[in-house]
Image: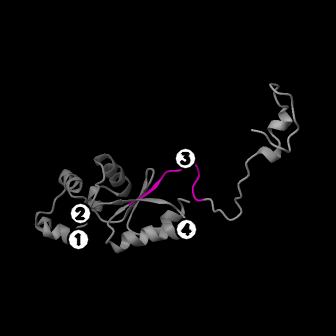
Amino acid sequence: MKNSDAPAHREGSRPHRTELFAPSRLPVKSSVNTPIVAVVGSPVIQVFGRKKDQETRKAERWFKERGIKVQSVELTEKAMSPGELRSVAARLGGMESLIDREGKRYVDKGLKYSAPTGPRIEALLIDDPLLLKTPIVRRGTEATLGFAPETWETWR
């Protein structure tokens, strides 16, 4: 790799260290108008929800407006793993707080009258992720349920 500005040296000899680190040879990238979005190694923000759900779209839009990349997980296509579900439930007050008892799906499955509790709720949420309240927003071990911009602000 020859540089016309660098002093010439004999064939086969090593260049002087000042030639190796000369400013003209270092790649320069402009970062004048580039916003810093995430620090290397920072946890990925995941938004679990449904495309048709207004609150989920609102959460995704909130992050997009601030230039924060998110991983959207469509619950109609992919469920949370049992480990993810337990982790989120532990942060948000248990499985009881995650089940959407007001939702149409809950009523359609006849759960309004059987009123599942305890371990049965966990099994239901693993089998049918559309029973979850949405959006569930995760960042590492932190999680929120619903639209919670005041909490997300602290994640920046």
User: Which one is in front in this view, the residue at disc 4 or the one at disc 2?
Assistant: 4
Residue placed under numbered mark 3 in the picture: 41
Picture disc at residue 44: none
Q: Which comes sooner in the sequence, label 4 or label 2?
A: 4
Q: CA distance from mark 3 to mark 4?
A: 19 Å
Magenta stretch: includes residue 66: no
Outermost residue, bottom side: 54
Q: Residues within 10 Å of mark 2 (few under 14, many from 20)?
A: many
Compute the Cα span from label 1 to label 4. Answer: 30 Å
Mark 3 or mark 2, whichever is nearer to me? 3
User: Disc 3 to disc 1, how far (Cα)?
Assistant: 37 Å
Q: Position of residue 14 (x, y in %)?
A: 81, 27
Residue flagged by tag 2: what amino acid is it? Answer: Leu
Question: Of marks 3 and 1, which one's residue comes earlier in the chain?
Answer: 3
At label 3, which amino acid type do we have?
Gly
- The residue where tag 4 is placed is 66
Which residue in the protein does label 1 denote? 103
Q: Quadrant of residue 79?
A: bottom left
Residue, disc 2 = 131
Question: Quarter of the image containing the N terminus?
Answer: top right
Outermost front residue = 11
Which residues are drawn in magenta?
Answer: 37-47
- The label nearer to you, 1 versus 4, is 4
Q: What secondary structure predominates along the stretch shown in magenta?
A: loop
User: Which sits in the foreground, 45 or 150?
Assistant: 45
